[in-house]
Amino acid sequence: MSPLPEPAAERLPARRATVGEGFDIRRALPHRHRRTIGAWCFLDHAGPASFSAGRGLGVGPHPHIGLQTFSWMIEGTIQHRDSLGCDQWIRPGQVNLMTAGSGIAHSEESPPDAAGRFQLAQLWIALPKAEAAREPAFDHYPELPVLERGGFRVTLLAGECASERSPARVYSPLIGLDFAAAGDARTELPLRAGFEHGVLVLEGSVELDGEPLEPGILLYLGSGREQVGIAASSPVRLLVIGGEPMREEILIWWNFVARTRAEIEAATRDWNEGRRFGEVRGARTARLVAPDIRDLQLSAGA
Ligand code: MN
């Protein structure tokens, strides 16, 4: 095994966390040593898991500001409802992209009365300051570009790769790719040297320029690379994310991305007192209450 060339890679262990009513997930971003990769500022991997009827994901209505939520469904289905009135099922191979901007609320729930399988990557993208207070919006992408590369099936989640472009509407230069292989696969993935990149294996194991990587570790590749070799010899699924390093300092607290503590305090008050964010109609799971703002520190996630 030869070590990765400069710039050095960092191996960042994901944390175990719980979302909704007791669903265990792995949280790879934010990490205390690595808050963002490009504008990607949050990365949860939920599942793969099986659940019995009534025991799937249930995340009740909760608010967001200053970010986009990017939901990549791998197995199973989830119903998204939001305060704009959108009611959208998301299925494997599809993306829900919710732009919170100045404020939106949503719920995410598995089908209520059936057993099922479940695997989801949920990411957040910090909006740049100039876009942070834009009007909220919701987009559903039922299909994304798929490339074949050396035995990998590569889905272009966000940004551009090999003259293909994802339709996902984002507001800063970034990339997101899902790699899946059923067995032997090998490719050299071209990278933009001006981007920093990270790799998270969801299932199976891979070698990145010869370095083995398994689930539970986010491999931060830094910037300045023009390519990375990705090789598998058994079934695998992984994400590659990247983007221009953020020059702005952001605060992440609960479900909010902001520049100042005052913005977070105002959003918290508005949510807990029923202003700004509107109603999520039809959700089966209880509305979440913001944690005590006095505990404000760098933690995130509903
Ligand atoms: Mn959310």
Image (tube, rainbow, N blue to C red):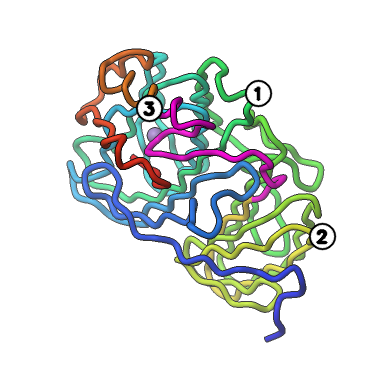
Horizontal and vertical percent for residue 169? Answer: 64, 28
Whether 88 is among the magenta residues is no
At horizontal 52% and vertical 42% (from top left) the residue drawn is: 93
Task: List the residue tagged with mark 1.
Answer: 130
| SS of the residue under disc 3 | helix
Report the side of 165 relative to 108 (left or right): right
Horizontal placement of 279 versus 84: left or right? Answer: left
- Secondary structure at badge 2 equals loop
50 is higher (above) or lower (below) than 132: below
Residue lying at the far bottom in this picture: please name it. Answer: 1
How far across and down, in percent of the image, does residue 192 sit? 79, 52
Q: Amino acid at mark 2?
A: Glu
Residue 206: x and y in percent read 59, 71
* Quarter of the image where the N terminus is located: bottom right
- Between discs 2 and 3, the one toward the N terminus: 2
**Number of the front mark, 1 or 3:** 3
Residue 190, percent from left and from top: 79, 57
Image quadrant, ligand 1? top left
**The quadrant where residue 77 appears:** top left
Say the numbered circle drawn on residue 297: none
Task: Tell me the CA gap for discs 2 and 1.
Answer: 30 Å
Q: Is mark 2 within 8 Å of ligand 1?
A: no
Asked if disc 2 and disc 1 are in contact, CB closer than 8 Å, the reply is no
Q: Which residue is identified by label 2?
A: 226
Q: CA distance from mark 2 to mark 3?
A: 42 Å
For the residue pair 72 and 137, the one nearer the viewer reads as 137
Q: Nearer the viewer, mark 2 or mark 3?
A: 3
Q: Nearer the viewer, mark 2 or mark 1?
A: 1
Residue 70 to residue 37: above or below: above
Quarter location, residue 248: top right
Residue range in magenta is 242-265
Tag 1: residue type? Answer: Ala
